[in-house]
Amino acid sequence: MGDIHILQLFRESFTLVILMFLSMLSVTFALERWWYFRSASGKADEVLGGVRKHLEGGKPEAAAAWCQKQSSAVAQVVGYGLLHAGRSRKDLEELMISKLKEERVKLERYLAILGTLGNIAPFIGLFGTVVGIIRAFRDLAASGTGGPSVVAAGIAEALVSTAAGLLVAIPAAVLYNYFMGRLKKQTVEMEVASTRLIVMLGAK
């Protein structure tokens, strides 16, 4: 057992290579989403507070321009509503809903990949486990004699594959749920901002 090394297992097990690639993929998309949510997050009250100051000064165009300069999804929805402030209430609501859906799609980007990785990684690890067990029995049959040293490599590959699958799946699932929670929060903020803006504008 002392002769079993992780690097050796990686050279002999393609499932571990796949799982390592998936783990790098998970980290990459998680960091990208974290950075995007960091800039796209915003609160309805804060955005509407800035808009209200411009509207009270009689500068609706300045309010729209201010929103467009903000990176938050809430500000983008509010700014889009201000650009169409002259329309009827029904049209304005539909336009803002369409913009909200557009911003939601941007927030959802790549989250499906994290969710998929959380679901399939354990199965890939299980596949590696089965391959490792098959290898252990093959080595045992080829040697004709028993003993731990004969099946050590196969058993090690099986156990490491299981652990690697879980190591990829658990963080991916946690990160997916975390970002989905932030997505729901931002969706609510956009809906609240849309409703309050329509009231502020007095659209009929």
Image (spheres, helix red, strand yellow):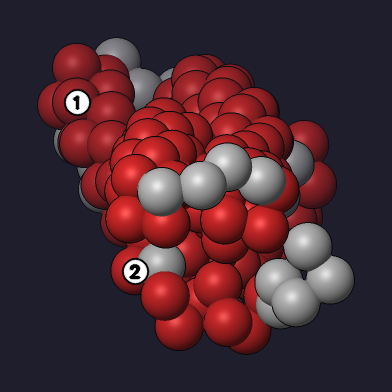
Residue pointed to by mark 2: 14
Quadrant where the N terminus is found in the figure: bottom right
Residue at 41% in and 48% down:
144
Residue at 66% in and 46% down:
147
Residue 193 seen: no
* Residue 166: image location, x then y, percent: 62, 39
Please state which of residues 155 and 26 is positioned toward the viewer in this rendering.
Answer: 155
Above or below residue 7? Residue 19 is: above
Residue at 70% in and 48% down:
148
CA distance separating discs 2 and 1: 51 Å
Q: Are marks 2 and 1 in contact (CB under 8 Å)?
A: no
Where disc 2 sits, the SS reads helix
Please state which of residues 47 and 181 is positioned toward the viewer in this rendering.
Answer: 181
Say which label, 2 or 1, has the lower sequence index: 2
Residue pointed to by mark 1: 94
Above or below residue 15? Residue 175 is: above
Residue 147 seen: yes
Where disc 1 sits, the SS reads helix
The mark lying in front, picked from 2 and 1, is: 2
Amino acid at the residue labelled 2: Phe
Please state which of residues 152 and 90 is positioned toward the viewer in this rendering.
Answer: 152
Which residue is farthest right? Answer: 2
